[in-house]
Image (spheres, rainbow, N blue to C red):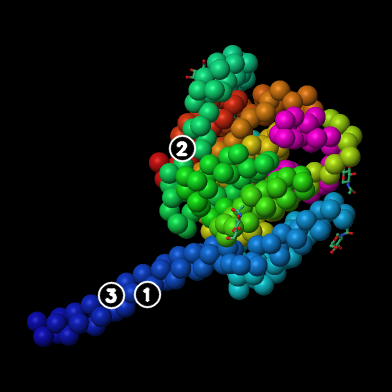
Amino acid sequence: MRCSKKLMIPAVFVGALLFLYIYMREESGDVRRMEIRDSLFRVNGLPEMVDTLKFVSTKNNTSSADDKDALLQHLSERYGPVSFVGIGPRNINLTPEEENRAAICLQNAVHDREKNGSRFWGKDEHIRRTHHSYLKNKNAVLIEAGGNKGNDAFEFVKLYNPRYIILEPLEEYTNILKEKFKNNSRVTVVNVGLGIKNEVVMVNIEGNNACATSKFSGANGKTPLYITNATAFLMKLGVGLFDVDLLTMNCEGCEFEALETILSTNLINYIKNIQFATHSTLKGLENPLGRYCKIQELLRRTHKPTYQYRFIWESWRRDDLL
Ligand SMILES: *[C@@H]1O[C@H](CO)[C@@H](O)[C@H](O)[C@H]1NC(C)=O
Ligand SMILES: *[C@@H]1O[C@H](CO)[C@@H](O)[C@H](O)[C@H]1NC(C)=O
Ligand SMILES: *[C@@H]1O[C@H](CO)[C@@H](O)[C@H](O)[C@H]1NC(C)=O
Ligand SMILES: *[C@@H]1O[C@H](CO)[C@@H](O)[C@H](O)[C@H]1NC(C)=O
Ligand SMILES: *[C@@H]1O[C@H](CO)[C@@H](O)[C@H](O)[C@H]1NC(C)=O
């Protein structure tokens, strides 16, 4: 008895230490992730980085962000020693079951688009703003692609006032947004759009308030659209070291390239909610309905829709949060 008692005390002690060690390790991991996320929003943090990014894409159409060592160096300078252990390519070939669903999706596409569009516009369309009450958490991070003049942004700020990065590829509208939100230190506006690669595309301004200006309207215009590789850009912000609460995209066709890029790596695992408008009738888009249906299947592997007007607007949430 004496003997076992003697053994028990050290055992309990060692056990407690082990528990404490594991607990503290996880705790410090979390603290570190929060620190990294928080430092993104420190004054002078983001704008400085983004200027560099815009410079790179404007001057020569290339990105140092595609270089892994440069990315790690950039993040280390920003956040201290970091490693992107989790980010890597994903298999984007559909399984036979996924192929079947995608084929059915394609068969119903035109009908669904019409049906869902007539319900959404003028009726349910505010859901894209009111659906996201989790953004009320004061640490929530919202990234929006396609800010335009800030109609959605204004509502997001009014409803949730999250930590908010607005991306807008037109310089003129970037400046309008900056002016509009200059008093809100939680909002950062960046002159860039999301896509598959870094490029500067010359377009014509189209639609009321330029709202239909698109890389895919096929015009050789006079105004530059600054576009960047969506994955590289998000990684450069540090996404992957922490989660984004919502990525929302209303970007005149950019959603196809941006989603395909994001879904081709497991960066998608670091996006808790992803919302997008689909612009499937733009002339310059290649096979928009087929691509939409494939995107549905790739997204379905990690996320599920929380509302969905197919081919119009929808939002998906990561499986572990459902
Ligand atoms: C592109 O521009 C960046 C920033 O000036 C520069 O570091 C990089 O070397 C340039 N790349 C090419 C291919 O010219
Ligand atoms: C986009 O960036 C990611 C991450 O750096 C890279 O793996 C991918 O090859 C890039 N895509 C293109 C088309 O450059
Ligand atoms: C979208 O259209 C399909 C097909 O008509 C219908 O089943 C579905 O309920 C619609 N979705 C919404 C949200 O209205
Ligand atoms: C920003 O704050 C300044 C000073 O408090 C005020 O004069 C200005 O009207 C505000 N601008 C906006 C756009 O709210
Ligand atoms: C960037 O590359 C695209 C082709 O990918 C080209 O059309 C465009 O003119 C280039 N822009 C600049 C500023 O070099």
* CA distance for labels 1 and 2: 40 Å
Q: Earlier in the sequence, mark 3 or mark 1?
A: 3
Secondary structure of the residue carrying tag 1 is helix
Within-10-Å neighbours for mark 3: few <14, some 14–19, many 20+: few
Residue 38 appears in the rendering: yes
Residue farthest toward the left in the current orientation of the protein = 1
Within-10-Å neighbours for mark 2: few <14, some 14–19, many 20+: few
Secondary structure of the residue carrying tag 3 is helix
Secondary structure of the residue carrying tag 2 is loop
The answer to whether the beta carbon of the residue marked 1 is less than 8 Å from any atom of ligand 2 is: no
* CA distance for labels 3 and 2: 45 Å
Q: Quadrant of ligand 1?
A: bottom right
Indicate which disc residue 187 carries.
Answer: none
Say if mark 3 contacts mark 1, CB within 8 Å.
Answer: no
Q: Earlier in the sequence, mark 1 or mark 2?
A: 1
Number of marks drawn? 3
Residue 68 located within the stretch drawn in magenta: no
The residue range painted magenta reads 192-217
| Image point (49%, 32%), residue name | 127
Nearest to the eye among marks 3 and 1: give it.
1
Choose between 102 and 93: the one closer to the eye. 102
Residue farthest toward the top in the current orientation of the protein = 111
Choose between 290 and 52: the one closer to the eye. 52
Choose between 220 and 284: the one closer to the eye. 220
| Image point (57%, 20%), residue name | 117
Q: Is residue 151 above or below residue 310?
A: below
Indicate which disc residue 15 carries.
Answer: 3
Quadrant where the C terminus is found in the figure = top left
Location of mark 2 (residue): 131
Quarter-of-image position of residue 295: top right
Location of mark 1 (residue): 21
> Residue flagged by tag 3: what amino acid is it?
Gly
